[in-house]
Amino acid sequence: TRNPICLPLATPMQYKLGLLMAASHEVYALLTYPHRMMHVRPSSRLSAGRLPRTSTSSPSSVDNLIDQEERNRQHRAGQAKRRFEKEVRRNDRISVLESTHQLSDAEQKELLALCKVRDSFEEQYDSDAFTEEHTEFKRQHNQAFLGLTRYCQQQRQLEMEKVSVFFLDGADGGTTRHLIEEGGLDASQCYVANRHLSTCKSLRLSGGGLLPNDNVVHLTAAEALSPESDATDDENQTTFAGIDFTSYYFDGCGGFVPHIIGMMTSALIRNENINDNACTAVGFSLMGGNRNVIEKEMKVCQALALIAKTRGMRTRHALDDPERYGIPYGISKTYDGTFTSWILLEPDN
């Protein structure tokens, strides 16, 4: 039986993002128009089992969040499989055309079009274009990531060698280098997802990077943190769903709120191998200008608070008291159209 969900009106650009965003839109709608969501009949189950519900949260809100993540997972698995198959067919066709001795006019146009599509999925992130101020901004937030990881490690009473961290990184491996060279983490403790194959190759040891090959996956963040199932057809690539991460850094993830919420639900609404009440840090960036950035941060933080309630936890803004968490004093949340925030999930005792 399909749940009748009322969604807020979407812009034409949002519609173009397709069904992948639909489930995250439900969380956004739940936060923006809670009175419209009262008639939802939640299933309140995930494939891994029933999640805890606390008395401090609205049952309909929490159950609807869990229910939408189940649908989100199912769609991510199908989407990743279709994208993988499409990419294989495209690359096969390019190989055939490039090996053809003489191409017709139509085949030349086809090859140019296919190469253009392939190139559009290459990494556009260029750290060499950063100003000195932008580089310092990134360094401070990499230090915030490290400081919060250490704080969570202490709260969990773990040895530093036992923690695992998930983050998004560019081809330059800036965050990877900071964690390993300045933070002392071992490369095996760092896990990265990137939808650009060229970036994945440059981050892996086999491509001259610092990370073990298995610790870098050619998937979106949401796909990488979802149960394997059909998330990938590459037999040499697995997801990170079974890893209990101490901290997450969703950097460079754009400014589309439902997309960011989708990454967080895939990361935090899980059962397998996860300590539900363990202190966890989450960082995220909103990019694309300062328009409505405060409201966007509020929506993301409200969603994260709702996610925390499914685990019997509460949220805290780490940048309100940076020194407590080993974060550089005077750290800025914004620079040149990029807004970065850090939230701590703690047991709600």
Image (cartoon, rainbow, N blue to C red):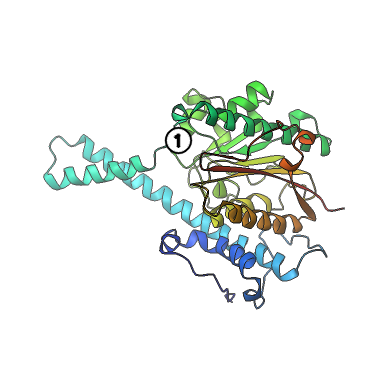
The x and y percentages for residue 96 are: 24, 40
Q: Which kind of residue does numbered mark 1 sit on?
A: Tyr
Residue 52: image quadrant is bottom right
**Residue sitting at x 67%, y 71%:** 42
Is residue 42 visible to the viewer in this orientation of the structure?
yes
Q: Secondary structure at mark 1?
A: loop
Classify 12 as above or below 251: below
Number of numbered markers: 1
**Residue sitting at x 34%, y 40%:** 119
State the residue position of label 1. 125
**Residue sitting at x 12%, y 44%:** 104
The x and y percentages for residue 80 are: 48, 51
Asked if residue 145 lies left or right of residue 223, the reply is right
Q: Residue furthest right?
A: 349
Classify 255 as above or below 124: below
Asked if residue 236 lies left or right of residue 243, the reply is left
Q: Residues within 10 Å of mark 1 (few under 14, many from 20)?
A: few
The x and y percentages for residue 187 are: 63, 27
The x and y percentages for residue 307 are: 70, 56
**Residue sitting at x 37%, y 50%:** 86
120 and 90: which one is in front? 120
Asked if residue 330 lies left or right of residue 134, the reply is right
Classify 244 as above or below 45: above
| Quadrant holding the N terminus | bottom right
Residue 71: image quadrant is bottom right
Is residue 212 visible to the viewer in this orientation of the structure?
no
